[in-house]
Amino acid sequence: MIKENIKTIKNNLPIGVKLVAVSKTKPIADLRQAYEAGQRVFGENRVQELCQKYETLPKDIQWHMIGHLQRNKVKYIAPFVHLIHTVDSLKLLEEIEKQAKKNNRIISVLLQIKIAQESTKSGLTLQELKEILHSEIFKKMKNISVEGLMGMATLTKNTQQIRSEFKSLKNIFEKFKNEQPHFKRISMGMSTDYPIAVEEGSTLIRVGTAIFGTRNKYT
Ligand SMILES: *Cc1c(COP(=O)(O)O)cnc(C)c1O
């Protein structure tokens, strides 16, 4: 089923939209099936699980961090992480910059924007985003590439609301695209709402359940 699910999702994606297979809580055997179907981009939301899966699976996989990231854990993923979707403060950026330098790498990140009305979803406001991108500290960073923005829509059946939240992320992206040299990605859309996200300009969808089935514990 995993292989078929991946093929079905990929066949219906426009060129330029990438699939992140969200494999959190799923066993290695499931990730291998996805790998055999050609999937090379995986997303995890916990540092320890991300590191264990990285150690176990083939090295041509690109590992994305899609969960809230604590500063004291950046060092564990800095040697190999391909993209961090969830940067929500200047302090976290500074730590990533520091660890990237130590590893002699440039680490790609997205800044997470709060687009949902739900208070449970985290992220930066437009004003906070502006303050970070225009700060002298940020401008001096050499080992970070800010490639765009990430957002999560409200968990609701109201598709008009979801669509308008995705539109707001796209609008913010457009505001900064010309001044930010590496801006090229918009990470939005999950199992239930990715078709809307793609229509609204997503370049990176993060899909778990629709590939691997439901998770036991919701994280
Ligand atoms: C779990 C998770 C997903 C995937 O959710 P599904 O509904 O299973 O597709 C996407 N993005 C983030 C940030 C997640 O934590």
Image: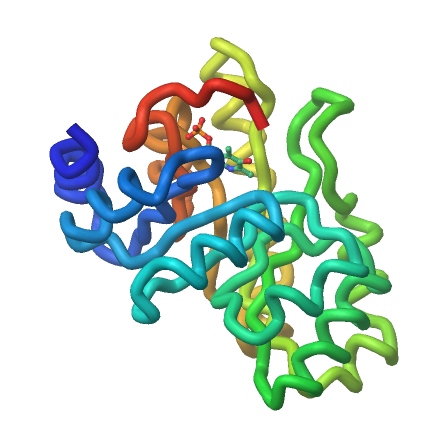
Residue 79 seen in render: yes
In the picture shown, does residue 48 fall above or below 74?
A: above
Residue at the location (58% across, 59% down)? 84
Q: Position of residue 32 (x, y in %)?
A: 25, 48
Name above or below for residue 65 compared with residue 60: above
Quarter holding the C terminus is: top right
Pinpoint residue 132: horizontal percent, then vertical percent: 81, 64
Residue 156's x, y, as percent?
54, 13
- Viewer-side residue, 119 vs 166: 119
Say which of 165 and 44 sits in front.
44
Quadrant of the drawing holding the N terminus: top left
Task: Name which residue lies at 66% across and 49% down.
Answer: 112
- Relative to 199, say whether 141 is above or below: below
Which residue is depicted at the point 28% across and 38% down? 30
Of 115 and 168, which appears nearest the observer? 115
Does any portion of residue 130 appear in the rendered image? no
As drawn, is 119 to the left or to the right of 158? right
Q: Which of the 4 image quadrants contains residue 155?
A: top right
Taking the image as shown, residue 126 lies to the left or right of residue 27, namely right
Residue 75 drawn at (x, y percent): 70, 69
Residue farthest to the top, as pictured: 157
Identify the residue shown where x is 55% and y is 22%.
Answer: 218
- Of 211 and 115, nearer the camera is 211
